[in-house]
Image: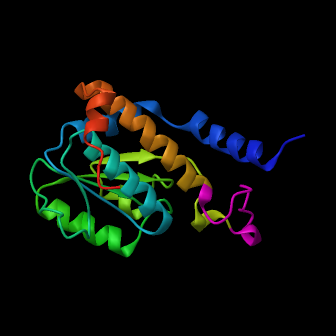
Amino acid sequence: MSTPYRQALAELEQVFDRLDDAAVDAAVAAIAGAGRIALHGVGREGLQVRGLAMRLFHLGLKASVVGDMTTPPIGAGDLLVVSAGPGGFATIQALIDIARAAGAAVLVVTAQAGGEAARHADHVLVVPAQTMADDRADDGGGTSMLPMGSLYEGALFVLFEIMIVKLRARIGVSPEAMRANHTNLE
């Protein structure tokens, strides 16, 4: 008999069985090659994006979260990383337009390859997971046992941690060096 935990893990496993690892590697390469990395996501996606920004900082990269007071300007050679699980948000599109006008590249992480945000990106990383936009049981959606897009958000956590592992190897940062960048003000 399956417990709810096993069912949720099985759903995550199905997401990663369908994930294009070449696209993950391309996203890792884009991040590794960027001068500065600005990151943004809305809602619970934004929480996962903030976690990615923290890990990029631990790697010693110039990463910041859009909206923080210490976020520097973005320009040529830089990368804007945004999560738009359901395909697009007005705020995400506005940031993409600003970044592109400044000469920065854009990496969109999304569940919708044909979504508005992906159509305006330089790099797209599709996470094939149910989002809040397609979880309504009344239209045949709602196949995940997790509520309101949590499958996508949970997949982002695992994906971003694996991307950090790949980045760490690619740029030659040791676990000890990462730990040395962790705050001591806790």
Locate the N terminus and report the quarter of the image it occupies. Answer: top right
Residue 72: x and y in percent read 13, 62
Residue 133 falls in which quadrant of the image?
bottom right
Q: Is residue 99 magenta?
A: no
Residue at 18% across, 63% down: 71
Dominant secondary structure of the residues highlighted in magenta in the image: loop
Above or below: residue 5 compared with residue 88: above
In this rendering, position of residue 94 left or right of residue 149: left
Residue 127: x and y in percent read 50, 47
Nearest the eye: 146 or 54: 54
Q: Is residue 144 magenta?
A: yes
Nearest the eye: 179 or 95: 179
Residue 174: x and y in percent read 29, 26
Q: Residue furthest bottom?
A: 90
Residue at 37% across, 61% down: 117
Above or below: residue 133 compared with residue 110: below
Locate the C terminus and report the quarter of the image it occupies. Answer: bottom left
Res 130 seen here: no
Residue at 27% across, 26% down: 170
Range of residues picked out in magenta: 136-150
Residue 110 falls in which quadrant of the image?
bottom left
Residue at 46% across, 46% down: 126
Residue 98: x and y in percent read 18, 67
Q: Residue furthest front?
A: 185
